[in-house]
Image: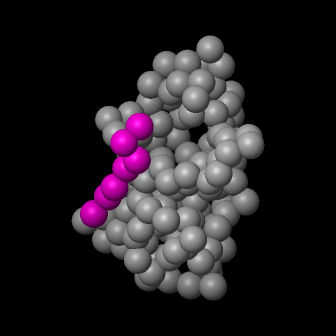
Amino acid sequence: QVQLVESGGGLVQAGGSLRLSCAASGRTFTSYAMGWFRQASGKEREFVAAISKSSGWTKYADSMKGRFTISRDNAKNTVYLQMNSLKPEDTAVYYCAADVIATTRPTDYDYWGQGTQVTVSS
């Protein structure tokens, strides 16, 4: 098993930036691809970004391309999501997730963090 803890959420004005972190513990971090997802109030959980075990492959949802960057530091067992040019529609609870294969489907991921709230004011 792997345990995931997100941090770095908060309130930011439109156009601002936040960096989310997700610290992993338990089984070997490099055994897992990592993903970020988000869920706005009243909406389904949606894919944000994913990164492979060695960082050689990344993928983003179309609406995040050019604004968000996913990265990982395997020495620190941490995955990051740098979010720039934030918009009010980015407001959501952001979750990190782990699975043996990087995909865009939340149902593929076995392990989830508790989430961190991001609120973007207009």
Residue 14 on the magenta segment: no
Instruction: Please check the rendered image and state whether residue 58 is part of the magenta-colored stretch, yes or no.
Output: yes
Q: Give percent across and percent down for residue 6.
A: 64, 55
Residue 74 seen in render:
no
**Residue at position x 37%, y 73% from top?**
53
Residue located 62% across and 74% down the image: 111
Instruction: Give residue 120's position: percent from left, percent from top.
Output: 63, 25
Residue 2 seen in the figure: yes
Left or right of 20 on screen, residue 42: right
State the residue at coordinates (37%, 50%): 60
Quadrant occupied by the N terminus: bottom right
Magenta region: 57-63
Could you say where residue 88 lies in the image, as x and y percent from the top left?
A: 59, 24
Residue 115 relative to residue 28: left or right: right
11 and 50: which is toward the camera? 50
Residue at coordinates 65% horizontally, 19% vertically from top-left? 121
